[in-house]
Structure formats: structure tokens, C-alpha cells
Amino acid sequence: FCIASGILIGVAGYTFHYAKGTSYLSNNPLACVNCHVMQEHYDSWIKSSHHSVATCNACHVPHRFPDKYIAKLRNGWNHSKAFTLQNFREPIRISQKNLEILQNNCVHCHNVLVSEITAHRGLSKDALRCTECHRSVGHLQVAD
């Protein structure tokens, strides 16, 4: 049992190190391009209006602890599983859960503007997703 556990821990540790696992704990956008499928998204973010004010995490994970790290853990697991099994779509697509996080972060950062717009029209903040109209704000239009 000890030898099998040691081998499992060793393989897991090596895999985590090889995959640059600790980089995902940071806010550095370069961590996102550890996977080749994200390069186009990273390149478009560099040219976008948000690159000087928002990192990948500012838009794509919750801002509060522990929700931020729960989302990073869930995404890390899902991404590593999909890339290992090679069963993901290219271009990569945002999940429904991550779309909800993205919407919450748009509203969080732009709360004054959004509250004035929704109050004017009598709409709730969830009536439309921000990315329905502002799809290329965080990333220039990425091919479908």
C-alpha cells in the first residue's frame, strides 16, 4: 500500500509540476496560455480595451475567497480532464457556470453604469447578459 501510494503521489506531483500547476494560483494572465487553446484568447485580450484594467481572473473567476479558489479548482479539474482525454471543442467555449461568473463580474465592476441603465428601463440586472452586446470588450472577436 505504501509503495502504491508513493508512486501515485509521485506521479501526481510530477504531473502538477509539469503542468505548471502553481501558476494557476496566481493572477498572472500568462498562466492561461499554458494551454495552447487559450493563446488566441490571450492575444485578443492583449489588444482589447480591458487588458490594462482587468486580468483573466478579474472577469472569469469570483472575486471573493473561497469562491475564487473553488472556481479555479473546478476549472482546473475540468480543463486538465478535457485536455488529457482530448475531448474539448476548439475554439474552447465558456461553460454556463463560468458565464454566470462572468456576468456577475461585469455587473460588479460596472455597477453604477448598469444600475442606471436597468433602473431607466425597469429591467433586472440579469435581464440580458453583458456579453450579448459587448462580446468583444474583453477579447476581440474570436472566430466561432
Image (cartoon, rainbow, N blue to C red):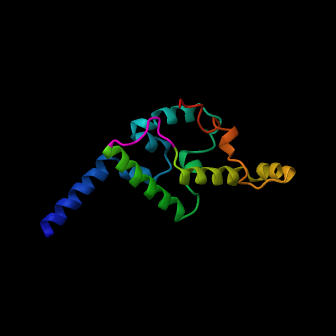
Residue occupying the far bottom of the picture: 1
Residue 92 higher or lower than 66, as above or below: above
Name the residue at 46% across, 41% down: 30
Labels in figure, total: 0
**In the foreground, 58 or 133:** 133
Q: How far from the left and from the top, in percent, is residue 96?
A: 55, 51
Q: How far from the left and from the top, in percent, is residue 10?
A: 21, 58
Q: Quadrant of residue 86?
A: top left
Name the residue at 70% across, 38% down: 133
Tell me the quadrant of the picture where the N terminus can be found.
bottom left
Query: What are the residue bounds of the magenta stretch?
Result: 86-93
| Relative to 42, 84 lies left or right | left
Magenta-span inclusion, residue 134: no
Q: How far from the left and from the top, in percent, is residue 7?
A: 17, 60
Residue 55 higher or lower than 141, as above or below: below
| Relative to 97, 15 lies left or right | left
Magenta-span inclusion, residue 88: yes
Residue occupying the far right of the picture: 120
Residue 144 higher or lower than 87, as above or below: above
Name the residue at 12% across, 65% down: 3
Q: How far from the left and from the top, in percent, is residue 12?
A: 26, 56
Q: Quadrant of residue 130?
A: top right
**In the foreground, 104 or 29:** 104
| Relative to 22, 135 lies left or right | right
| Relative to 32, 137 lies left or right | right
Name the residue at 87% across, 50% down: 120
Magenta: main secondary structure:
loop
